[in-house]
Image (cartoon, rainbow, N blue to C red):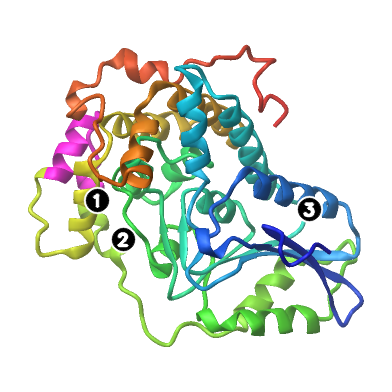
Amino acid sequence: MENKDSVVIVEEVSTASGHKVGVLTLNKPKALNALDLNMASLLLDALQAWDNRDDLVCVVLKAAGEKAFCAGGDIVSMYNAMLESDGEIPDFLATFFRTEYTLDYTIHHYPKPIIVWGSGIVMGGGMGLICGASHRVVTETSRLAMPEITIGLYPDVGGSYFLPRLPGKTGLYLGLTGAQMNGEDACYVELADVLLASDQQPAMFEALQAHPWKTEEDSDLATQVTQILTGLNAPESNLPKNVESHRGLIDKWCAPSNVADVVNNVLTTDVSEDKWLSRAQSTLAKGSPITAHLVFKQCERGAQLSLADCFRMEAIMSCRCGQYGEFQEGVRALLIEKDLSPNWKFKKVEDVPKEVVASFFDSPWSENDHPLAEL
C-alpha cells in the first residue's frame, strides 16, 4: 500500500470471501488528474504486480476529487520538452508515449476485470485509461471527449482503434470536432458499459467487498463484476441523447471519402439552433487543419489494424507531432500563453500538402527498434 500523498494511491481491499480487490486512485485533483509519466509508470507497475495474483479478483481505477477522472496527459511537460528539442523528436515524448501506450494496451488485455469509475471529465489520456477496461462506468457528471484538434495533436491513446469501430461515422465526427459526450452518449457508442449515479461509488465498494467471490476455473470473474454493477442505481434524471439523436446527420456529413469534403459539410451547415452541434462545429473551425487530416487518416488506417499495430502507428504519429511544431503551438496558445489564437501552419484543410500528412506516418525507427515492438 502506498502513502496518501502519492500521485497514484495503490491499495488492496479485503473481501468477505477472503479475496482482494486492487484499487488505484489517480491523485492529482488540482490538475484534474492529468496523467504524467510518473503516474503512468506507477499504474503500469501496479497492474503488472497484480497480474498473476490468485487472491486478487478485480481492479478498480478511480480518481480523487469530484471534477475529473482524468482530463488528459501532462502536455505542459511535453511542451517544455518540445521547446528544448530544436526540431528533433524529444526523448521525453518518446518515453512518455511508450509508457502511456503500454499502460493502455495492458488495460485492454488485462486478465482480470478492471472497473474504471469515469465520473467527471474524461478526456484525452483519460479516454485511454477507460476505453480498454472490461467494465467502464460513467455517471450523470461524465464528460468524455477527444479534443486534441484544439492543440494540434490527434486522438491517440488507442483512438486509431476505437474511433473507426464506433457506430456509423460517429468516431470520425467525435475525433474531428472534439465533441463532448455525456454518459448516455458514451453508452450509445459503446465506449462505456454502465451508467450509474455518481453517489454510487461507496455502494459499489460495499458490494465488491460483500460479494462471495468464486475463483474456480469454471467461475467467470467478469460476469460476477457485471452482476454487482447491475445492482447499483442509475441517475434519477435522463441525460440528452446527443449522439444518437444526431446520428443521421453525422453519418451524412462524414460519408465523403476525403477529409476536405467532410470538414466542409460540418462547417457549412447551419446548426445555430443546436447547442451541442454548434459547439462541435466551432471546435473544428478553430482547430488544426493538420489534425483534421491526421484524424481522417488514422480512422482510415486504424479500421484495418490490430490494437497493437494502432498503438505502434500512434507512437510514430505522436513523436512526429512533437517534432513538427503544430502540437507545440497548440499547447502554447491554449495552456501556456493562453491567447487562444494558435498560428497553425496552414489556414485551411485544403491547404495541407499530402506529403506533410504522410510525414507523420513515417517511422523514425526500424521495425525492430520501435519502442512498442514487443506489444
Q: CA distance from mark 3 to mark 1?
A: 40 Å
Q: CA distance from mark 1 to mark 2?
A: 8 Å
Task: Give the amino acid at mark 3.
Answer: Ala
SS type, badge 1? helix
Viewer-proximal residue, 71 or 363? 71
Residue annotated with mark 3:
46
Q: Position of residue 315 (x, y in %)?
A: 55, 29
Residue drawn 60% across and 14% down?
365
Circle on res. 243: 2
Q: Residue furthest bottom?
A: 236
| Quadrant of the image containing the N terminus | bottom right
Q: Quadrant of residue 355?
A: top left
Which range is magenta?
A: 250-267
Of pointers 1 and 2, the one earlier in the residue sequence? 2
SS type, badge 3? helix
SS type, badge 2? helix
